Image: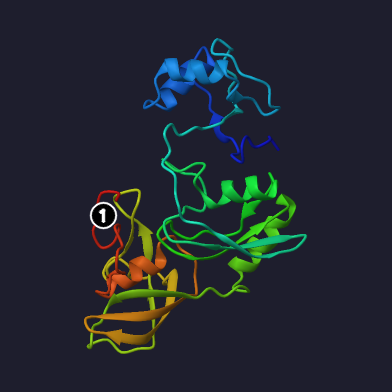
Amino acid sequence: MLPTRDGVGPSQVALPAGPWPRMLDFLVERFPAIPAPEWQARMAGGDVVDGTGQQVAPDQAYLPYSKLFYYRSVPHEAANPAQAQILFEDELLVVADKPHFLPVTPSGNYLQETLLVRLRRELGIDALTPLHRIDRETAGVVLFAKHAADCAAYHGMFAGGDVAKTYEAIAPFDPSLRFPMTHASVLVEGEHFMQMREIKAGESEGRAPNTRTEIELLEMRGALARYRLRPLTGKRHQLRVHMAALGLPILGDRIYPVLLPQG
C-alpha cells in the first residue's frame, strides 16, 4: 500500500495495451483536461509513481498491463468551515458525525476539505477507510475502518442487511399519498453520469425491483413535511430518486428531478 501525502492517498490508472511510446504520452491522452507541461511538472515533483512507489519520469517507456499512481492537488481549494465530530473510536473503528456540505472522500474540486482527509491527518491513520458514504449535502454518521484487512467483513455486513440505515428528509407534502409505504423500483444509470433514473413500468417488465425504501411521514409544516427514510437496498442516490419519483423531491436537491449547476 502506497503512503498518503498530507492525508491524501494516490489515485490509480491501469495501463492497457496501446501505441504510446512513453508514460507521458499515455497520461496526456487519458486525461485530456491536463496539459503535458502540468504532467511533466507533476512527474518531476515525484507525484507520479509506479506500484512500488518509484518516481516515474516523463520519458519512461510505456509499460502495458501495469498501473500508475498519481497524487492529486487542487489549487486554491476553498476552506470549508463545517466541522465534524468523532462520536466513537476503538481499535477497529472510527465513527464521525459529518456536517452538511462536507464531502466524505476526495473528488473533483474537493481534496483536503473532505472528512476522510481531515480524519487521517487528525488521527495519523493513513489506512483509515470509509465503510459507506453519504452525499456532500447530507449530514449524518459515517463509519471508518482503521485497518484495510477489515473492510471486506464490514462491507459484507452492509450488503447482507446486517446494518440498518435511517435518514430524515424535508420534502413537499402530497395528501394523495398514504404513509407509511415501501417504494420499490428498478434504478439504472441515467443519461448524465451524475444521475440515476427510475425506469418506467413498460421498461421494467420482467425485471424485479433492485431498490426498496421504507418511507414514513413524521410531521407536516405547511406545504412541506419531514420524512423518515429507511433504505432496504443500497443503490447510488436511491433515496433522492425514490422521493423525486413520488413527486416529493428532497428540499435543496440539485440533482433530482432536474440537474442544476453546482452551487
From the top left corner, tell me how far across and down residue 21 is, in percent: 51, 12
Image-quadrant location for residue 210: bottom left
Residue at the extreme top: 59
| Residue at the image point whose x is 55% and y is 18% from the top | 43
Residue at the extreme front: 81
Viewer-closest of 74 and 2? 74
| Callout 1 crowding tier (Cα within 10 Å): few <14, some 14–19, many ≥20 | few
Residue type at mark 1?
Answer: Leu
Q: Classify the position of the N terminus by image quarter.
A: top right
| Residue at the image point whose x is 43% and y is 15% from the top | 37
Q: Check disc 1 and report the residue beneath it.
A: 259
| Residue at the image point whose x is 27% and y is 74% from the top | 248
| Residue at the image point whose x is 51% and y is 53% from the top | 104
Say if 65 sits above or below 198 in the image. Answer: above
From the top left corner, tell me how far across and down residue 171 is, in percent: 30, 75
Image-quadrant location for residue 95: bottom right
Residue 19 appears anywhere in the view: no
